[in-house]
Image: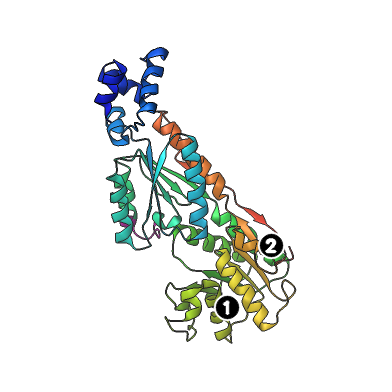
Amino acid sequence: MNIYDIAKLSGVSIATVSRVVNGSPRVSEKTKQKVLAVMEESEYTPNVFARGLGLNSMKTIGILCPDISDQYMAEAVSHLEKRLHECGYDCILGCSGSMQEAREHHTRLLLSKRIDALILVGSLYAGSGKDPEETEYVRAAAQQVPVFMINGYVEGENIYCSYGDDRQGAYDVTRALIRRGKKRILFLYDSQTYSARQKMEGYESALTDAGYPILGDLKYYIRPFGMHQPEEAGSADISENSAGYVQNKVLYVKEMLLAHRTLEFDSAFACNDGLAVGVLKYARAKGLAVPEELSVAGYNNSTMAVCCEPELTSVDNQVKRLCNDAVDRMLEVLQGKEDVEQDHKVRCEIVRRCSTDF
């Protein structure tokens, strides 16, 4: 069945059937019900692409994230998909991975699907902040459709950013540890993204405000695919094929800390909960009491924070709120509203559990 068959069976014009399909008010209720009855009886499903051509809208939103298996990304996409479906929009999901070329390729691929807007989930799409060319593809995409960023900031026309104040969240956790007398606070991170840089700035600012030195050996970068490297110190001898990291980042962090026998720290703050749980496993292996001998805090307030023992103190960066905010502003933009806020920063909150004593 096609639109011509439906028009013939209904005794109306093709244009009238098109108006019914597209929800136009220029059709009487009686005619609308007659056409809908024929469509239902014939089991006719309107072609969404043909419908989109008529409305100049596909009612479809593109969502791009680096890796849907990541818990933060999965939670964000789940919230976005639910809200968008409630608002009458379908979704096309892409997973770009982390490489620059792949991010650009998947962005172009989604744009080719005639989407109405593009949502980029994760601070990876905001680049490292060192080279504006890293985010040029985002500004190029915004020349075609509105672009909405979750947990990242890129300045540009038609780009709308919703992100947690990670600098403030990291500052608050570090200050809380300092107030409890902690002097050697280990900072663990596994990316060079906008979000990770903001967290490091918050960590360093809290140390500076307390009169503490910023020590390179206490800033540990967990390299993808295996090797970790302190910013200003030697690295532990753990090969790229370490089964702990390849199979489970949590176990890799534990093994990395156990291998570095000279590293001294009385607390740890990690850029995500996976890294922090790795520190908890290290503490258990060393026989250290948490939080009495070692305090540990993570980030994202994921389910991992309550599935470990002891339960993990973590910063909630309000992922659900960020997603709802992005969808709300997307609807305003697509409805033609002017002066929609482009830069929306949300305060992060510490969720205190048993891994700290503050």
Residue tagged by mark 1? 254
Rendered position, 47 above or below 270: above
State the residue lying farthest toward the front.
Answer: 41
Residue closer to the observer: 95 or 319: 95
Residue closer to the observer: 46 or 340: 46
Magenta stretch encompasses residue 78:
no
| Element carrying mark 1 | helix
Q: Quadrant of the N terminus?
A: top left
Looking at the rendering, the stretch of residues picked out in magenta corresponds to: 127-134
Q: Residues within 10 Å of mark 1 (few under 14, many from 20)?
A: many
Residue displayed at 39% across by 27% down: 40
Left or right placement of residue 127 versus residue 195 in this view: left
Residue displayed at 49% across by 55% down: 74
Q: Residues within 10 Å of mark 2 (few under 14, many from 20)?
A: some
Q: Nearer the viewer, mark 1 or mark 2?
A: 1
Instruction: Say which amino acid is labelled 2.
Output: Ala
Residue displayed at 47% across by 50% down: 77
In primary-sequence order, the first of circles 1 and 2 is 2
Majority SS type along the magenta span: loop
Residue tagged by mark 2? 176
> Looking at the image, can residue 68 be seen?
yes
